[in-house]
Image: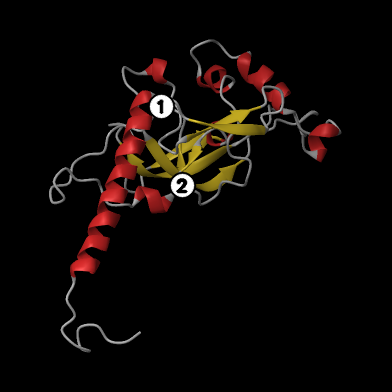
Amino acid sequence: MSFLSSIGFIETNEQERARLAQAPEGSLNHYLSTRPVTINEWPKDLLIELPWQQPRTDRAYRVVVVPIEFREDALPKGVEEERLPRKLHSGSWKCAVVFSDHPDYPAGGFRIDVPDAQIARGRKVDLAVALAPLPSVSGETPHEPEPLCGSCQDYGLITHYDPSTDGITGHSRCADAQCVERAAKRAAEHERKRAAEEAEAAAHVCAGHLCCPPS
């Protein structure tokens, strides 16, 4: 719990969840009340995959945005100052869509407004992983990757959160059968390549100093 939350200046995580849960079932806020906060840092310029409320659509879409500009919530007419405790994740972000498979949110700089509470429950995207080459079947023909594991997003570890504070309490290995199988295949492929490189090096016949200059 932050200092400002401990003195009652800003909502605690529990107070925010309770407030969001008061929204009608099926609404975005009610859905967000069921998800833990995963991004506690200032999110400007981060790559963030938004949590998608699947019941609202016939499939789960993936939308990745970059928060650009923060906007505070407007106070009701006649109110000059927000009452205490202030909302934990108030306001919204103007975001640029950088990846999307949703027809209404095209990538390439399309701008959308996203509530800060939704940003805070998103998933930071690792750019190095996102730009990694696609796996191939034969070593020559790229193909689309399999869907990410629904439990660990293919990280191999599941993060556990304290239900009261949302603090991280530990990690455990993902036990999803398909995820475990894919991890075993990746490990086997890595070992195959390593063995092939060692065999090639062992079979190499030096043709002189121009071939194998002294180290």
Query: Amino acid under label 2?
Result: Leu
Going from the N terminus, do you reach mark 2 or mark 1 first? 2
Which residue is depicted at the point 44% across and 26% down?
175
In the picture, the disc for residue 47 is 2
Look at the numbered disc 2 and give the secondary structure of its residue: loop
Label 1 neighbourhood size at 10 Å, few (<14), some (14-19), many (20+)?
Answer: few
Give the image location of residue 139, x and y in percent: 16, 50
Q: Quadrant of the C terminus?
A: bottom left
Give the image location of residue 24, x and y in percent: 55, 11
Instruction: Look at discs 2 and 1 and give the one toward the viewer.
Output: 1
Above or below residue 193? Residue 114 is above
Horizontal arrangement in the rendering, residue 114 relative to residue 84 (left or right): left
Which residue is depicted at the point 82% across and 39% down?
3
Asked which colour scheme the image uses, the reply is: secondary structure
Evaluate whether residue 89 shows in this view. Answer: no
Horizontal arrangement in the rendering, residue 184 relative to residue 85 (left or right): left
Give the image location of residue 105, x and y in percent: 34, 35
Which residue is depicted at the point 56% across and 17% down?
30
114 or 159: which is nearer to us? 159
Q: Name the residue beneath numbered marker 1.
A: 150
88 or 104: which is nearer to us? 88
